[in-house]
Image (cartoon, coloured by chain):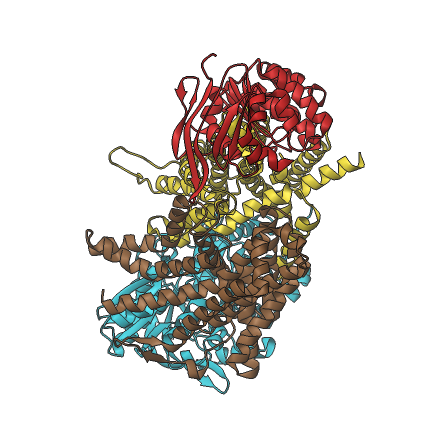
Amino acid sequence: MKFSKLTFTAALALALSATNASADLKVGMITTLSGGGAGLGIDVRDGFMLAVEQSGVEGLSVVIEDDQRKPDVAVQLADKLIQSEKVDVLTGIIWSNLAMAVVPSTTAQGKFYLSPNAGPAALAGKGCHANYFNVAWQNDGLHEAAGEYANKAGYSNSFIMAPNYPAGVDALTGYKRMFNGEPAGELFTKIGQNDYAAEIAQIRASDADSVFFFLPGGMGISFLKQYANSGLDLPLIGPAFSFDQGILQAVGEAAVGVKNTSQWNKDIENPANMAFVKSFKEKYDRLPSLYASQGFDTANLLLSAMATADVNDQDAFRTALEAADFESVRGEFAFASNHHPIQNIYVREVIKEGDVFTNKIIETALIAHSDVYAADCSF
Amino acid sequence: MSRERQINIALVIVLLTVPLWAWIKDEPFTLTLCTRMAILALAGVGLNIALGLGGLVSFGHAVFFGLGGYTMGILASHAQTYSPLMESPFLIEGTKSMPIIWLIATAVSALVAFLIGALSLRTSGVYFIMITLAFGQMFYYFAISWPAYGGEDGLSIYVRNGFPGLNTLDPVQYMVLTYALLGIALWFFSRLANSSFGLTLNAARQSPGRVQAVGIRPFKVQLFAIVISAAITGLAGALFADLNRFVSPTMFSWQTSGEIMIFVILGGVGRLFGPVAGAALFVFLEHQLGGLSEFWHIYLGLILLGVVLFARGGIVGTLAESGLKRG
Amino acid sequence: MDKAILQVKDVCKSFAGLRASYNISLELYPGEIHALIGPNGAGKSTLIKQISGELRADSGSVYFGNKNISGLSAAKRAHLGLARTFQISSLAMEDTVLQNVMLGALGSRGNVFRFFGPVLHDKELLDRANDALARVGLDQQAAVCTAELSHGQRRQLEVAVALTLQPKAFVMDEPMAGLGGSGSRQLTSLLDKLREEAPILLVEHDMDAVFALADRISVLVYGEVIATGSVDEIRGNLEVQRAYLGEEQ
Amino acid sequence: MSLMLVFEQILNGIQFGVMLFLMAAGLTLVFGVMGLINLAHGSLYMIGAFAAAAVANATGSFLLALAASLGVAAAAGALVEFLVIRRLYNRDHLDQVLATFALILIFSEGTRWLFGSFPLYLDIPDYLKGAVILPGGLQYPLYRLTIILIGLLVAIALYLLIAKTKIGVRIRAGENDREMIAALGVDISKLYTAVFAIGAALAGLAGALVGAVQSVQVGMGEPVLILAFVVIVIGGIGSIKGAFIGALLVGLTEKLGSILLLALLSSFLEPAQAKSIAMMFSSMLIYILMAVVLVVKPSGLYGRRV
């Protein structure tokens, strides 16, 4: 019996034996490539591989696996990549619950993990680990920015809602941490819920002056479409997850004008970003998403560390990662003491460019922001 | 020797040779896959008692798989943080010992199965399928909404639980442990199928009125079958959680119930080695096809469809029957 | 005459206003075969079900021995020694003939909750099962799968299963149904010998068998017993001829 | 909790229930007539939504999109009936479950292969946008009212189809006795294909109607499928009337249950505690309802005794 390996090997990895062996590095990417959430995983993968390709570096090979968004599959793949493929670094996971399943045992086995998307509070505070680096955001970050923006916009009683799961609880906690007003109502919805008639009725019955919602993926699409037809016209604020390039086209007009918070947008003006947006469009024939930008940054962080340290010297490699000496597409980027980002978080507005719905940055909500959990973290 | 027995022996040889080869070649991941197969097969052996012998189509066996998993998760997480589960009226502490976890997992599953079974057996046929599904969904949503043990995120355990005298973190040793438990379960199943109880359960499936007419209440027999069945599936759940060092509400989902059912149907309903053959094929396909294409679910679907349409009685059933026809 | 073993007293049952049993009373005495006849839809099967416990009567009672069993489940009644056979064979078709009789033996002994010992090695049960098979003449077929039996053999097997219960009374629902002449004759002679062991309440359409076997006959029409008596009395009863026999001729 | 909120939630419950009825009607017909458990019914819902989105994006017409959802789902239903389903009628429920589970895998990944991994755009037409003021001053989305109307029309049409037409007579005959209908000389395989296609078309229509206010994405069918099963089981399998009552019950439970539960708990618990308990149980309510119905009436509300 032979178990095949789904191996997308970077072109130059074939020349592996010819190059300086000490610089070789093998990355395992576990991400969601099939089923409902595949769009996000595909973006992370494409962003990551674009950076790998552009670097032209020798000795880097990438093994990509599909977790089907199932935690037990993800764990099993992590075992496979570590035990069989003998990878040095793992990355790729989209969802918090999958990250919670994989990350602790990965770092416990002495491997590095670079998170291109999920940032659960548990891994930023007490459960942090020296070998775990988050290149995206701590879960609370975008919600905190939304709370800060609500203050600036003069809202004093937002109706706030999120799905009833840990990331949803984090979202509301994050918003309230920054928000100076008093929530007019607080709701937890069902995971995967697609009909928000009941929630809209409760918003209508409240005396809110604004609505903050965290409903990633399809849930957000459904909510926005239904909200637009409800006759309600309270301003909406949310994190970027419901307004990303991949799903914005499915929301359509209903999203136009909505403010959302993000650490990245395609119009951030720096050379790295402009080059990234251009080359991504050329290669994949679509606009890059937030997730693609995170995948791209993750690969570049890894490449920067690889250039200065050998992964077999863990301490040196960790120091190289901590330096974050790469051109992030989001501009300024550094790691806080818990290996989570210190970065700006912007407010974007959904606009229509020709036929395409997209975002533009309208202001900066938080400057050089880092999360509150760092204090609980000691390696 | 019957044809089915020959198939079973062949299957045992293959399933022992693969890990042996992997162990010699130092392929720890193949061992992990074998462990996974053995645990899923164990869950299937449990379901096969209710489904195969008793004809009770439970679409809610994920409840017991999940309960086993959460028993492990909850006990181990409390042991990990040295915080007792309960202090009054009496002290209950967490544990990292597999035998204790297994005992509690089977007991909890059996108890819940008793309650669910007693209510569900009021119905029959499709209604039975659906009421068991309803109970599954209740547990699923409860697990998601209950914040104490991680909700949707689930619970991680950093180190696998211990078994006296073994290093369970070593893939080979944990695999041997699961193989041993699967072996015991298969032995138990074969004894059960030929026992007084098995005979009665089998008859209750085919003709409940007959069982009643000879003075036995089918309800009692079927309820007991569900309880035993759940206990074994619960044990498998605890092992599965320990394999992944992780539990999540996914273990309670209807897809999990469906998958356990698929192992049994794929392999052969009511056949001793049905769930083993089914789980082995499923794990094998998952890994073979996953490498072929991003859209490998299509192939999986086509293969499953092929088995239903053209290999009635599952793998073991079809092979055994074709042997009969050839004489 | 001795005291009745089985006594049905004023039993009534209706379904959604439709009267299926109306004030039915009848007795089964030791050593007799009591036939219950009547046209289709007369309520014979409904009555049998009320006696065996699959249905509960709306009013009235059923006594077995001296005990009022009206409130007992079918399983309990079987356990007391009331053995019934089914009109439509309800054997475990995938099982062997032996397994089917073993089930009966097991039921009568009680204690099915044994999970380890192979049931087919249980000497006590095996003896009882083989004995029953021998008596109905199926001992050669013990290892055959029930689905492969002929219709007549399945009827014999039904009786064999009932025999393993060591019954105090039989309730048989059309055992001759679908049997040809020779099969019917064979079963008739089997039942003839059985009455010594336990009396039989026999629901039957086959009039030759009824007249050959019955000690007494009750006639059921539209849920009511219109006559009870010896074979000759029933043959001579004008009401019966009009209501029932007449329409058959 | 204001009266207005309750009123709005009742409307929401009816709208959700009517939607579930469209799904459940086909499922219960297929079960009643052919004795088939069809897990792939949710895939037909998804196919309807994708067909509608594709046509709406190409033509800009919502009505054409709805027509496409009916047509494509019916065609897909007929095709799958012809290729696979008809081989399953004489099988036991287990084989049906496994085979239709396999069909879900094929349909879902096939759709993703055709349309990609991102949700599709489908919006309601301008003339159905916005809210209307109902008597009492309640603002309610016009589109949701339209859905209620369409659902009720379909329910009436189904009733007429089954009670008054020739095909209805055959369907009823088929429910009671499969051999009898074959003996009547009706081409039973054509009847089955027709029934399956009607069920598929209704599911497709539901998918398109819902897709316009929700997300059109792969996997959208499964949650609805489970709810539709809950509906037909509560109503009694095979009964259209049961499916209708069951759908409304489930719809109202879903929309009203959590606020009523919260109000109930708040009457004797502290607000924070009441809220957290209500939250934990609100998603279980439907399944509790179903279990209770089955324990009390083991064949559903209008099911025949099995």
Chain C, chosen colour in render: red
Question: Looking at the image, is D165 positioned above or below residue A125?
Answer: below
Chain painted yellow: B
Relative to the observer, which residue lies in front, A188 or A79?
Answer: A188
Residue furthest to the bottom = A354
Chain painted cyan: A
Q: Position of residue C129 (x, y in %)?
A: 61, 18
Relative to the observer, which residue lies in front, C100 or B94?
Answer: C100
Residue at point 37%, 50% (across, down): D288
Q: Quadrant of residue B11?
A: top right
In the rendered view of the protein, which quadrant contains the C terminus of chain B? top right
Question: Looking at the image, is C172 positioned above or below residue D197?
Answer: above
Relative to the observer, which residue lies in front, C83 or D282?
Answer: C83
Q: Quadrant of residue A199?
A: bottom left
Residue furthest to the right = B326
Chain D, chosen colour in render: brown
